[in-house]
Image: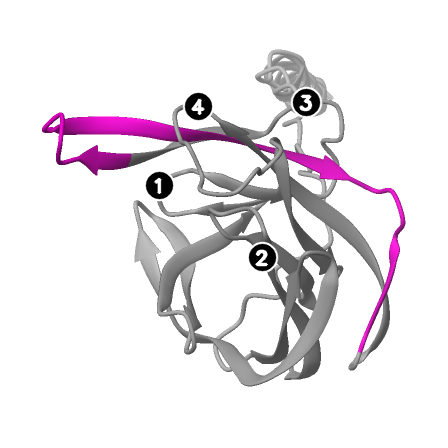
Amino acid sequence: MKKFIGSGCIILCLALVFACKKNKAAPEEDPVEIVTLPVYESYSALKTGNYWIYKEYYITNGVESETKALDSCYVSKDTLIRGNAYYKYVSSNWGTREYRRDSLRYIIDNYGKRLFSSRNFNEVINTHFMVMHNDTLNKNDTLFKLELSMSDINPLTTVPAGTFRTLDAVTKISNVHYAPATNTIYPLYNHEKYSANTGLIYSEQNFASGNTVLVKKLLRYHLE
């Protein structure tokens, strides 16, 4: 009987020891907060192998004339710049070679310049100046101030490739120090209209004289 009681005491003591250890277990860590970044539609459609063919037109003194020129734009490759993936965007007709990427609700180049925004309609998203060397004064001369802002006015854009819902990247061109030969009235406005998951649909680019506008309309495209 004493042996039985002794054994019972040992079992009871062991149970108490394990119970104490369980009660003294390390407190649970606070749950890790998982931050989910918002996902925005891509208006650049940047992916290696994608291309866009544009038909070019000129508007001179308000009259549009069709040209025989086509501009082939394509994404030739991707590369890492400062740890971020950029895509090389090439325009065969105008010699453009730029590295671009989507950055949340913006399209930016490898210098951090904002080219487009799908959400920011309340402020100027990029300001820069056009500077040319003045041989007479032997110094750089600032000619124009360019301010880029976004517009969602007139969202439907019709081009040879179809009708698209677009957002318009509008560049306001102000004359700082330039005397054109013609009676150009400033400011002038450039337009680049993008469609979600398709890319650039339509553009208008003013010449320095202010009398002629180069227009590009999407003719056909291929997306990987």
x 66%, y 27%: residue: 33
Label 1 or label 3, whichever lies nearer to me, is 3
Q: In terms of depth relative to the viewer, which is nearer, 170 or 114?
A: 170
Label 2 or label 1, whichever lies nearer to me, is 2
**Residue 123 - label:** 3
Can residue 37 be seen in this snapshot?
Answer: yes
Type of the residue with mark 2? Thr
Q: Earlier in the sequence, mark 4 or mark 1?
A: 1
Q: Quadrant of residue 1?
A: top right
**Residue 176 - label:** 4
Q: Distance between the residues labelled 1 and 3?
A: 20 Å
Q: Is the magenta stretch mostly helix, strand or loop?
A: strand
x 52%, y 79%: residue: 71
**Residue 212 - label:** 2
x 44%, y 31%: residue: 144
Q: In which quarter of the image is residue 19?
A: top right
